[in-house]
Amino acid sequence: MSTLIIAEKNKAAEKIASILGNHKYCKKYAYSVPYYEFELKNESYVIIGLAGHIMGYDFPEKYKDWNSIDPKFLINITPEKYITKKKYADAIQKLATSAHKVILACDFDREGENIGFEAKKIIESVSNIPFKRAKFSSLSSNEILNSFNSLTEINENMAMAAEARQILDLKMGVIFTRYLTISVQSKIRTRRMFSIGPCQTPTCGFVYEREKRIKNFESTDFWKLEAIFSFDKIKFNGIHRKGKITEKEEAVQEFNEIKKLNKAKVINKTTKENTMNPPLPLNTTELLKKISIYFGLSPEEALTIAEDLYLAGFISYPRTETNQYSTDFNFKEIVEAFKNSEYSSYIKKLPKSISPNNGKNNAQDHPPIHPIKAVSNKKILNNYKDSSYWNVYNYIVLHFFSNLMPPAIFEKTKLTLSIKNSIFDSKGSVLKEIGWLEMYPFEDKKDKTLPLCAKGDVVEVIDISCENSQTTPPRKMTEAELLTLMEKNNIGTKATSSGHIETNKIRGYLEKKGRTISISDQGYILMDSLNAAAPIIVKPEVRANIETLIQNVESGKDDFNQVILKGIDEIKSMFNQLVAKKEIVIDQLADSIYDEYVSRDEKNVVGKCTKCNRILRIIKTENGRFVGCTGFPSCKNTFSLPKKGSIVVAKKALCKKGAPAVLKVGRKFHWALSIGPCFKCELEKECFPPDIVGACLNCDGYLFVINTESGRFLGCSNKCGFTHSLPKKGRLSITSDFCKICNWKIVRVKESKTDPFVGCINRKCIKK
DNA sequence: GCAAGGTC
């Protein structure tokens, strides 16, 4: 008989086996899941690692059909817990049959407690052996040995809190997602799904709030007075203390007072040293943020790369909230590993006695993210064929060393100058001690020097400007900012926050554009209408409320069943708010799908409807073609079209008579919607100035390009009957250069695969 | 087909 230990993951299981078995352990497999056997104090032990949760909640089979089950009905249905990873369940059941005791040794947090609890449930169905709990904050020898010497009981409240979260998250997600999706689908043919969740929706909501501010931003004028000074031949600038002056008169008056003066006096000077501490030890969110800022990778991409680097043994476990090293962390071992690597020059610069600049967060699960092995740039590029892997690895290494370095010291100087009664401020900054910045090439560390003038000195004024500018809207949100907001508001965890952003991208709500993230039209409409119907769903409170409820389960203050009922009440109340205003939400979403569907049919989209602002499109029937509104039948707006000729929408052409769109028919002529052919319009030449090539060779008119179905030629503006040929093939363009001999425009003709002809085409000129 | 949380 042995003792069975259950860890959260294989990596932890192997490490614990190595520590408790004093490096002697034997790897075996049960249902292809690895486990480890070892001996401790002459007793035999078996340890197996799970793969996180091996069970999950779902609604029973009979509620699976979206169309026959009213989502509202699901609010009161209790979901059931199923085994989701059968081989792990089989493996632990098998190992439990030959064990006399089980020790749960999952991560020491709420989910870890719950994962152990799942294993307990699965084992209890085949055995009634006793369970104990080992709690450790890191996988260091001391911690592990201590925790197994002082086993505790399972914290059932903690496990049940996670259970309550699972049930409430599932209920809310499923009910809202199904309701929105099937409601929209009943209005319009689409396969699109609209998903809602207590993490994904507020995540999208953060971006929505920012974009709403950008959208509603109205810029205002302001004036800024700036002076350029000179002292000891060093030029430097100063900004008027009033900063942005919103009244023009005030700025101009201030400017007029001083604009002709050429001396300023230094009325104050302050110098102080600024210490910039090294970055804190790296946790997941910080890593994802920095990788997004410095290299533009999305958090999801960055996490995937970090996981690969971890599995390769290059870096430590990448999912942690901890930014504090435990006291027995072995820095020496890592420094030693990097001594003869590409990083050797950095190693030489490390202080003799190593001490990290620790943060305050200790989730007691894993150490901060740090390098394990020195790997060359070449090896990483060979391994992964992707320079992003090197960027992430190199960042982790340099961040790790930077953290061990002394602070950087800047000397900040502030000068206050007066030109008559106007006060100007000048700021300078000089790097005195490079400290950790020497290891950290990711930040710009340019100096801004000021001359060595003292209080009372007089400096020259070289220039004073009074510039008018406009206030600018808030910037687009970066993925790094979004991660910060999620972290602050407790949306998601270190392991899931990148996933929530990704879900929003997959659903088509959010779009990554370089380093920024923006909301799609559909995402905006969804957030905007939800915000009008049931605003809480879009805000982080939706998650915080559930969190508060389940914390009461964890602390034992509230009964599990009571909390589930309270949670159900909250979901019901949000759901009723949405249903009460369903028209706003469902109609707008259906419209957005319709617009999206239509605009994908780009060739036939003509423009916006003059009556209802929806989309006008070309409609072809057996009897011919016309332009109709996509709002049909509620909008019956139509326009006729010429019967023959291919039609292309002339996107840039603007009709001076106000037609909603201008179409190009064949190569022949333009057609203004609601008006007719442009050649019948007296404004045609204004809208489409002719391509004039040069003077007519027959009269005092000029020759311009005429396109017909059978070809192109030059015709006379006086209609004198003179014509001139044009090259038959190739793309013809009239340049702005003139022939020096005959003063015709130089033309350019480009046929595919040959060099373009550029020259004069006047046949009389060529003969000369 | 739906959530969020683990991890491979």
Image (tube, grey):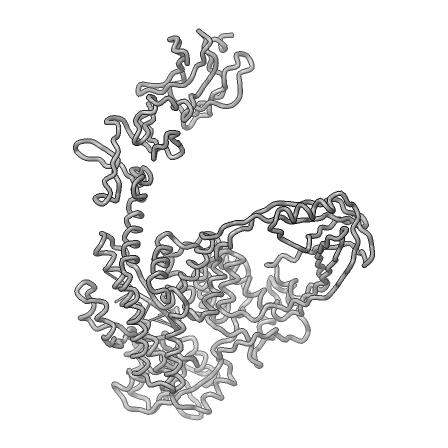
Give the quadrant of residue A498.
Answer: bottom left
Nearer to the camera, A104 or A512? A512
Give the quadrant of residue A126.
Answer: bottom left
Q: Answer with left or right where residue A260 lies relative to residue A317.
A: right
Residue A751 visible in the picture: no
Estimate the x, y position of residue A2 in percent, counting from the top left. 35, 89
Nearer to the camera, A144 or A377? A144
Nearer to the camera, A589 or A30? A589
- Say which residue appears at 40% left-offset and 33% top-offset: A652
Estimate the x, y position of residue A526 in percent, counting from the top left. 34, 57
- Say which residue appears at 30% left-offset and 43% top-offset: A612
- Say which residue appears at 56% left-offset and 15% top-offset: A740
Estimate the x, y position of residue A445 in percent, counting from the top left. 65, 58
Q: Answer with left or right where residue A735 lies relative to residue A449.
A: left
Residue A530 visible in the picture: yes
Q: In this view, does A367 lie above or below A397?
A: below
Nearer to the camera, A151 or A605? A605
Quadrant position of the N terminus of chain A in the picture: bottom left
